[in-house]
Image (cartoon, rainbow, N blue to C red):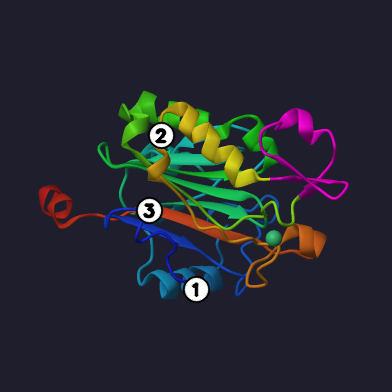
Amino acid sequence: MTPLFDHVFPSEVVTFMSDRSLDFAQGSKIPREGRFNAQQKSFLAEQLGFVPSFLADVRQVHGRRVILATEEFMRRNDFPEEADGLVTNISNVALVIRTADCLPVFMYDTKRKCLGLLHAGWRGSYQNIVQQAVSIMRQNFRTEPQDLKAALGPAIRSCCYQVGGEFRDYFPREIIHRNQDVYLDLPQVNTRQLVELGVWKENIFDCGLCTCCDKRFFSYRREGNEAGRMISLMMLRETPTQKSSRS
Ligand SMILES: [Zn+2]
């Protein structure tokens, strides 16, 4: 899978999403060094052309907690914390989330040079995780929504995402009725929430790929508990000026 959003974000931002060629599912209680095994690390090195100096991940719980990945966070983060999003402004720290139908949301503040990566399933979206992420970015980096660019990765879409009737109450605006059934447009939920926060619609890019239709991806809906996990990765590349000012 090639980097998805090179045309969306400026060159200092690295984005990547894996396909089903390698399973990135997270075992339970895996310490830091074991979260990414040698095969996964070499796969990433091959795909990205470099090895990120730190892979910051979380234990995803379908909530709205978003963590600031600081140097302190990385020192003490022996076990992944329970959260569904990460933000940082530190270069070479690769934010990582895992999905198999849920929506990966990539965000970059073009002015403050900080980024966020979210795991937005219906539960996280119902709790408006994008709002929480923008609020954490605002608190820590003075992010203004109009400076944000956002990209929505491969996820299950309204072509396949049949849901129960109770979703009419959860997402009244993003429900689609087809035949007798109810479908949810999850990327549209997140797009609306971003726009309500003040992100410009023209700064939101949706890749449009459906993980359930497109057999290149793992899909929980299609494969059930056997489904592996893809990773989404987002990183701020160290620029030559930062390098020289540090030495
Ligand atoms: Zn589909």
Q: Which mark is residue 199?
A: 2
Q: Nearer the viewer, residue 155 or 185?
A: 185
The alpha-carbon separation of the residues under discs 2 and 3 comes to 21 Å
Marks 1 and 2, Cα distance to the nearest angstrom?
Answer: 34 Å
**Dot 1 amino acid type:** Phe
Q: Residues within 10 Å of mark 1 (few under 14, many from 20)?
A: some
What is the magenta range? 162-184
Above or below residue 219? Residue 104 is: above
From the top left corner, tell me how far across and down residue 59 is, in percent. Answer: 62, 44
Say which quarter of the image contains residue 34.
bottom right
Q: Secondary structure at mark 3?
A: strand
Q: Is residue 236 left or right of residue 218?
A: left
- Image position of 192 (left or right of 203): right
Closer to the eye: label 1 or 2:
2
Residue 105 located left or right of residue 103: left
Residue 50: name its quadrant: bottom left
Residue at numbered disc 1:
43
Instruction: Determine which of the numbered discs, if any, sits on residue 235 in the image.
Output: 3
Q: Residues within 10 Å of mark 3 (few under 14, many from 20)?
A: many
Percent x, y of residue 100: 67, 57
Q: Residue at x 68, y 72 (%)?
A: 215
Other-residue count near label 2 (Cα within 10 Å), few / some / many at <14 / 14–19 / ≥20: many
Q: Nearest the camera: 195 or 91?
A: 195
- Under mark 2, the amino acid is Val
